Image (cartoon, grey):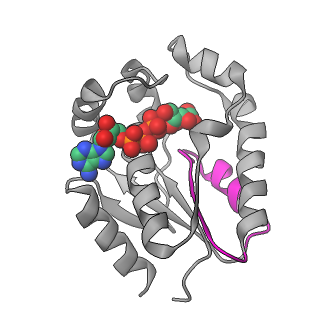
Amino acid sequence: MKQPKIIFVMGVSGSGKSTIGKLTAEKLGYSFFDGDHYHPKSNIDKMSKGIPLDDTDRRGWLETLNGLGREHRQNGAVIVCSALKSTYREILRAGIENSLFLFLKGTLDRINNRLSLRKGHFMPKELLQSQFETLEEPVDALVVSIDDTPEEIVHRAIHLLSN
Ligand SMILES: Nc1ncnc2c1ncn2[C@@H]1O[C@H](COP(=O)(O)OP(=O)(O)OP(=O)(O)O)[C@@H](O)[C@H]1O
Ligand SMILES: O=C(O)[C@H](O)[C@@H](O)[C@H](O)[C@H](O)CO
């Protein structure tokens, strides 16, 4: 496979997207963008109150991340985004031929445990159930299990990306 220039790291809240995405970008020498930093304040306020985002809330945010992908498609970027639905992934990858989704797959129990330990993040762990309900697992993504150390997960992801 020709190594993709834009890698979207996807999965439910707490699946490890920021952790794995940052390390993967470092290894590949790509820019790194964390989708969490591109939400409008209204979205952050909503999630902080424990209310899940809907399609309308997410639309502009997904378009912004697609714009980032288009901007960096020559030099390479890892972009972190939950990308829960197939229609969201269509928005994200629109016009970017050499893009790929890396799906971090884990169980609700395991992620719930990790979120119980995480401090200082706006996303309440009570929203995790709705993240799983919204998730449409991708059929055309690279899939890595989250049941390992971040270093091992990144090692496997890079192996998959370069084969
Ligand atoms: N492989 C791993 N093993 C153990 N802990 C991990 C692993 N990956 C991530 N974590 C921890 O799990 C928590 C969630 O990870 P992280 O914040 O990267 O997830 P996320 O998908 O970016 O979350 P969100 O979408 O809510 O921003 C963090 O406290 C992180 O340190
Ligand atoms: O689509 C969504 O519901 C949101 O994007 C969330 O997943 C957050 O961005 C983030 O992952 C929370 O930490």
Question: Does residue 25 belong to the magenta stretch?
Answer: no
* Left or right, residue 28 beside residue 144: right
Asked if 40 appears above or below 145 in the picture, the reply is above
Which quadrant is home to the C terminus? bottom left
Instruction: Kindly tell me whether residue 12 is visible in this rendering.
Output: no
| Quarter of the view holding residue 47 | top right
Asked if 4 appears above or below 40 in the picture, the reply is below
Region in magenta:
74-96
* Left or right, residue 105 beside residue 95: left
Residue 39, percent across and down?
67, 33
Q: Residue at x 34, y 24 (%)?
A: 119
Question: Does residue 84 belong to the magenta stretch?
Answer: yes
Asked if 100 appears above or below 147 in the picture, the reply is below
Residue 54, percent across and down?
65, 28
* Left or right, residue 114 beside residue 64: left
Asked if 128 appears above or below 140 in the picture, the reply is above
Q: Residue at x 38, y 18 (%)?
A: 126
Closest to the observer, 31 or 43: 31
Q: Residue at x 37, y 47 (%)?
A: 16
Closest to the observer, 115 or 34: 34
Ligand 1 appears in which quadrant? top left
